[in-house]
């Protein structure tokens, strides 16, 4: 199966259901708050994408709540207001044809490490395989063109995960399952790294010779 796999053989209705499943899973894991965070996805190669709405409880979002936008932010379908973060999602889709799904979460441990000036290290096989290099994006207010431009710049490096300083994380992948996994692994690695450091130990990393791009 190609990297597009999980999206290539599902319908648009199924894609919308999967967006909602991921959004609810993130809420249940404590990676987003009741009204924070957002998820989007598109069919492979599409110039439009579906995104979660603004002002709707993240633990109960339904397919009928989603909004379909083109890459300029014009509403194609949907009755609610799209997430204010749509410019950031659109920016990624414009410059990353390999990305068909984006998860924006508020991983508390990942954000805490970034606020302390500590980057994510390759301390596990999952970190190496799923994350690769994690970029830290300077602060800009959510929903602004300034943030979208910064994300566009950093996303072009090919990174699968971006940490938005003082804000949250952006996980990008070819499908929703992978994007969800990137966000979750990012937090798992951050927690393990924090535990080691809180015990006064520098976390051991996988030797550089064994580290290959995902």
Image (tube, rainbow, N blue to C red):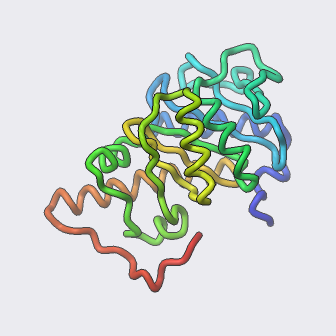
Q: Where's residue 19, x and y in %?
A: 67, 37
Picture quarter containing residue 56? top right
Q: Residue at x 21, y 60 (%)?
A: 197
For this rendering, which residue is in front, 53 or 10? 53
Q: Where's residue 40, x and y in %?
A: 67, 37
Q: Residue at x 57, y 58 (%)?
A: 159
For this rendering, which residue is in front, 75 or 149? 149
Q: Where's residue 176, x and y in %?
A: 66, 47
Image side of residue 153 versus residue 112, left or right:
right
Q: How many marks?
A: 0
Image quadrant occupied by the C terminus: bottom right
Outermost residue toward the bottom in this view? 209
Image side of residue 132 versus residue 19, left or right:
left
Image side of residue 26 versus residue 50, left or right:
left
Q: Residue at x 41, y 51 (%)?
A: 187
Image quadrant occupied by the N terminus: bottom right
Outermost residue toward the top in this view? 79
Q: Where's residue 179, x and y in %?
A: 60, 50
Picture quarter containing residue 188? bottom left
Location of residue 40 with respect to 212 vertically, above or below: above
Location of residue 149 with respect to 123 vertically, above or below: above
Q: Residue at x 85, y 41 (%)?
A: 11
For this rendering, which residue is in front, 166 or 110? 166
């Amino acid at each position: 199966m190609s990297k597009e796999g999980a999206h290539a053989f599902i319908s648009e209705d199924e894609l919308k259901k999967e967006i909602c499943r991921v959004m609810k899973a993130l809420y249940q894991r404590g990676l987003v708050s009741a009204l924070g965070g957002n998820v989007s996805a598109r069919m492979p190669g599409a110039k439009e994408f579906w995104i979660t709405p603004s002002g709707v409880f993240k633990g109960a979002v339904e397919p009928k709540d989603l909004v379909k936008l083109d890459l300029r932010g014009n509403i194609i379908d949907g009755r609610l207001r799209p997430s204010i973060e749509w410019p950031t999602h659109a920016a990624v889709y414009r410059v990353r044809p390999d990305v068909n799904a984006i998860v924006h979460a508020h991983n508390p441990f990942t954000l805490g490490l970034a606020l302390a000036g500590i980057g994510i290290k390759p301390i596990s096989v999952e970190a190496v395989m799923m994350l690769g290099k994690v970029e830290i994006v300077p602060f800009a207010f959510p929903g602004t063109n300034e943030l979208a431009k910064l994300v566009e710049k950093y996303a072009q490096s090919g990174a699968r995960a971006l940490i938005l300083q003082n804000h949250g994380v952006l996980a990008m992948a070819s499908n929703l399952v992978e994007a969800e996994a990137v966000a979750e692994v990012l937090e798992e690695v951050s927690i393990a790294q924090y535990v080691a450091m809180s015990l006064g130990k520098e976390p051991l990393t996988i030797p550089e010779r064994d580290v290959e791009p995902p």
